[in-house]
Amino acid sequence: MNYQDTVAWMFKQLPMYQNQGKTAYKADLDNTLKLAKHLKNPELKFKSLHVAGTNGKGSTSHMIASVLQEAGYKVGLYTSPHLKDFRERIRINGEPISKQFVIGFIRRNQEFFKQNQLSFFEMTVGMAFTYFARKKVDISVIEVGMGGRLDSTNIITPELSLITNIGFDHMQFLGNTLEAIAKEKAGIIKANVPVIIGETQPEITHVFEAKAKENNCKIYYADKEIEVPYESDLKGSYQNKNIKSAQLASKILNKLGYRITQKQLKSGLTNVSRNTGLIGRWQVLSQNPKLICDTAHNKEGLRYVITQLLQESFENLHIVFGVVKDKDLSTILTLLPKEAHYYLCKPNVIRGMATHHLKNKFDASGFKSTSFESVNEALNEAKTKASRNDLIFVGGSTFVVAEII
């Protein structure tokens, strides 16, 4: 198989949560542990930093990786999902995993994957850990896929754990209260490994404190430890919380024996996109009219994005919007500005919410909207209708953004 054939097999043959939803979710680590043993436990052959949270974990992971690169380390970075190419998920110093490695890894282990019915995410984690071990990285920043306790990445024992925040997302898997979700995220806290909590949320602090005490580890709160965030090339006011987490992570890593100067820290934070290849976070794609996209897709994330959107200067606001069908729209519609015109669309994945269903919801809530068969058709119409002084925003789902970048 060539690279395209290999990736096609991965998507078609194996269940993947991002495309299918609940049927792809496995509530234990048995398969991951079995795979790790089959691969000769690559997770034991490199140092790591583990990042979980409802929002900001991707941006924070990229920030920390960028800082470590500026400090001269060979840095692995594992994140999900990807926007354009599967290889975005697995990088070393910003360079995506090679197509040949992807092909070879799948070819060598394909029968094992089939026999054990491994999920897309399980085998991708195995690929990343094998790649980082083979390439002898100094440290890898590993982003949790979903939750924490039962996430496939949670077989590592990191140098440092980091939980950005807790919000209502993936409730069908993680629980329907903040406390229940926090307990799942807290599952990445390991014995004697320091942990950073990015955002202090008084109603769930006791969950993290209890888990940290149980594991005899020091707990830090980024929003209490860091008063003023540094500048970053990742724009969006919501990034300030992620910057504070990355700053504190650098401080703690120095205590653990790493060497990161203030100059390297600042340089890493202002060169995240260049160093790591991150895209889709408050990304300005063009001007006149200004076109912005952002991958925020839940209530907490969209609240920050919409707040910043309304601070922009424009005559008319056009929003290209689509979501996945298991999204609770009742928590999102109250955040969206009524004065905008919406171009509703279905992202091209199995989980995409049908446009007619989305429009019914928008109509019932009094929004002005038009529906389209595809994301690009919706965007093209928005560009046609917008004047030079208008603003176009594209979002609602990672998958919507992926189709227009």
Image: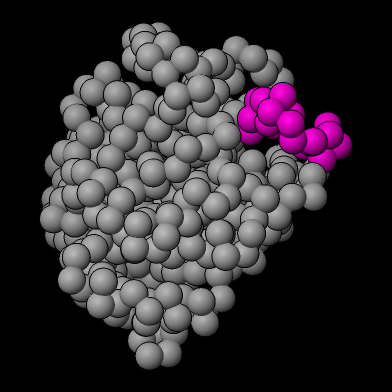
Which residues, given as a range, are shown in magenta? 246-265
Q: Looking at the image, how many numbered discs can be counted on the residues?
A: 0
Residue at 19% x, 65% y is 116
Residue 330: x and y, percent? 20, 35
Residue 47: x and y, percent? 59, 45
Residue at 48% x, 63% y is 130
Q: Which image quarter is the N terminus in?
A: bottom left
Can residue 30 be seen in the rendering of this structure?
yes
* Quarter location, residue 98: bottom right
Vertical order, 330 against 105 (above or below): above
Q: Main secondary structure of the magenta part?
A: helix
Of 18 and 194, the residue lying toward us: 194
- Tell me if 174 is positioned left or right of 400 in this view: left
Vertical order, 317 against 302 (above or below): below
Residue at 47% x, 51% y is 43
147 part of magenta stretch: no
Can residue 321 be seen in the rendering of this structure?
no
Residue 247: x and y, percent? 68, 29
Of 298 and 101, the residue lying toward us: 101
Vertical order, 366 against 204 (above or below): below
* Quarter location, residue 225: top right
Residue at 42% x, 60% y is 40
Residue 306: x and y, percent? 45, 37
* Quarter location, residue 8: bottom left
Of 118 and 317, the residue lying toward us: 118
